[in-house]
Image: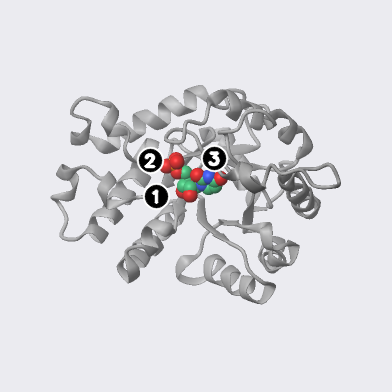
Amino acid sequence: MIIDRLHEEVLNKGNVCVGLDTHYDYIPEGFKKRFNSPAECILNYNLSLIDALKDKCAIFKVQISYYEALGLEGLKVYAETLKYIRKNGMLAISDIKRGDIAKTAGQYAKAHFEGDFESDFITVNPYMGMDSIEPYEEYIKRGDKGIFPLIRTSNKGARDIQFEKLENGKTVFEHTGDQIYNLANKYIGNCGYSSIGGVVGCTHEDESEEIRNRYKNMFFLIPGYGAQGGAATVVNKLLNRGNGGVVNSSRGILMAYKKYENGELNPIECAVKEVEDMRKVIGVIHE
Ligand SMILES: O=c1ccn([C@@H]2O[C@H](COP(=O)(O)O)[C@@H](O)[C@H]2O)c(=O)[nH]1
């Protein structure tokens, strides 16, 4: 199962998930000067980061919106970035957050688990119901693909809907998470986690320990670290003896150079330092 590979990557390289939400504005002027177009520059920034970080992170997450926003040129960069990650033996999460009726979800599955945009994991939005997740199962069953449905997101607005109490006494995110968890239990790998994981942000502390205990076999994609202010203490509650999750930081790594004097001259080295620092504060126990 694909989750066994991710579990192994965490054992070997720690819990960092490097987010490639690569906006042209995030790249320093000196780096930009070497290229003829924003698309070419973004691709080269990504490739340089992948080369420098592939031995220091568990996985890369590519946020599709930053590439879609640049039209066809951007989508070519998106495809090339995914190809490069996977060609280097690394795993990729495509952060696409799709959610639609089953027939349409089937096309999303084909689009992101095969062909030009093939990825190892995708994020999905389960709030249209469990039938919107079913089409991905065909790929999960085969063993080499996985999904991360949204459960409790990192944004402030998560409280608007996901934290609401239902008549059954559960919050909306627990009700959703429980249904995902039931399905996830069909696809447990040798490592004890399922290839159906869950997105749980590290910006809301209160229920974090409870969430970890409620979803024991669920591998978490944990966004919110760095630019959104998510804390290492929350991350450690969501992890399970140092495994069971990867922690994403995108802007915090892409623009790490801003923390250092003259950092813009060496943005890739600054990103490496950021990932190394991140590894030191999260998920210290591995077994
Ligand atoms: O709950 C969620 C789900 C997904 N995300 C995504 O993670 C990254 C976060 O970027 P930062 O720059 O590290 O804040 C981004 O791609 C989001 O779309 C999330 O933040 N929260």
Is 248 placed left or right of 44 in the picture? right
Mark 2 or mark 3: name the one nearer the start of the chain.
Answer: 3
Count the marks: how many?
A: 3
Residue at left offset 38%, top offset 40%: 251
Residue 132, percent from left and from top: 69, 66
Q: Quadrant of the C terminus?
A: top right
Q: Is residue 112 left or right of residue 268?
A: right
- Count residues near mark 1 (Cα–Cα under 10 Å), then give few for <14, some for 14-19, many for 20+: many
Residue neighbourhood size for the residue with mark 2, other residues' Cα within 10 Å, grouped as few (<14), some (14–19), many (≥20): some
Image coloring type: one colour
- For label 2, the residue is 251
Q: Please report whichever mark, 1 or 3, sits nearer to the chain's N-terminal start.
A: 1
The residue to which callout 1 is attached is 21
The answer to whether 204 is drawn above or below residue 172 in the figure is above
Determine whether the beta carbon of the residue marked 3 sits less than 8 angstroms from the nearest atom of ligand 1. Answer: no
In the rendered structure, which disc, 2 or 1, sits on the residue that comes first in sequence? 1
| Labels 2 & 1 near each other (Cβ < 8 A) | yes
Residue 156: assigned label: 3
Q: Is label 2 within 8 A of ligand 1 (CB to nearest ligand atom)?
A: yes
* Mark 2: amino acid: Arg
Question: Which residue corresponds to the image point at 78% horizontal and 53% vertical from the top-left?
Answer: 179
Cα–Cα span, label 1 and label 3: 20 Å
Query: Does residue 235 appear in this view?
Result: yes
Q: CA distance from mark 2 to mark 3?
A: 18 Å
Q: Secondary structure at mark 1?
A: loop
Position in image of residue 200 (x %, y %) = 62, 41
